[in-house]
Image: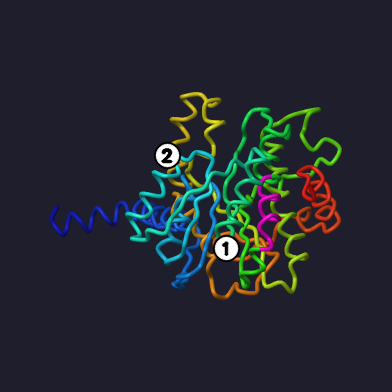
Amino acid sequence: MASFEMREFVQQHCTGLCVLTFTGVGLILLRRWMTGGVCRSRVRLDGKTVIVTGANVGIGKETAKDIARRGARVILACRDLEKAEKAAAKIREETGNGNVLIRKLDLASLKSVRAFAKEIQDTETQLDVLINNAGIMWCPKWKTEDGFEMQFGVNHLGHFLLTNLLLDLLKKSAPSRIVNVASLAHKRGKINFDDINLDQKYDSVVSYSQSKLANVLFTRELAKRLVGTGVTANSLHPGLVMTDLGRHVLPTISLLLKIAMTPLALFMFKNSWQGAQTNIHCAVAEELKHTTGLYFSDCAPKEPAPQAKDGEVARRLWDLSAQMVGLDK
């Protein structure tokens, strides 16, 4: 196209071109905003020991990989040891860190949680960071080995017991950190004390929201109880992440809706690396050494829902959880 014709084209289509340009820029900025913050810390973790639950896939695997790259001894706490070993081998290969181990942990079994904690106590001399990352979302009305509703049992009770059993080692290793992966879904949550297992009326979304609210409330109460010990506890929302966490809901969606949603999901959702950034930030950022009891999203403190700041509910949930898992037994 000649220069004269080009000028004519631009003049005739100026409005449309401006709209396209600004729309394109807007979409790029929106996409960048959706992918969230990035952990900027370059701190090394040589000589440190870190446990990541659910570390064989998704953001757990990406978190473990980043921690390993910083030189830490990383323990992948996973239910499926075959998948865990494959993930560990990949992490060792990509980071050059051979000190990446796997340990059996099934959060749907209190027996397994206790066995894992005892093994850690018997074999590890220190624990600098515990990242409670594993979770289950929107599953059918399943029960754990101990008879608890699955999402509350795995997402909250399993991690509640695990954390308490490892507290002495964390205190011994202070300054140390506990990172609890919650979700924005906590804002729709309510702790159903009269029907904690939702036996009267089960809804997978309601259950998930309750379990994620429990994560934030647990973190709040835990932080209070750890004041003066050198151990911090923070919770976080990793963002909308494209992982297999939603594997239980996908089969219920029609093929047509899946096709329609795919472009939107690819545009709006984070990948696993992006979703792991707030995990990593809370685990390693130097400026958070003394920060505790907060809720993070996109590598920055955020205000949780009002019900997540209710101290009385947090204490009541702690007492109920301790009773359910037999913490003193």
Reply above or below: 19 against 303.
Answer: above
Determine which residue is flagged by label 1: 129
Instruction: Specify whether residue 165 is painted magenta.
Output: yes
Reply above or below: 312 against 170.
Answer: above
Mark 1 and mark 2 lie on one chain; the one further toward the N terminus is 1
Of residue 109 and residue 6, the one placed in the foreground of this image is 109
Reply above or below: 107 against 226.
Answer: above
- At 62% from the left and 35% from the top, the residue drawn is 138
Determine which residue is flagged by label 2: 263
Which of the 4 image quarters holds residue 203?
A: top right
**Residue 112: horizontal and vertical position, in percent?**
62, 41
What's the distance in space between the residues labelled 1 and 2, CA to CA? Answer: 37 Å
**Residue 164: horizontal and vertical position, in percent?**
71, 55
Residue 74 relative to residue 120: left or right = left
Q: Amino acid at mark 2?
A: Pro
Instruction: Please name the predominant secondary structure of the magenta segment in the image.
Output: helix
Mark nearest the camera among 1 and 2 is 1
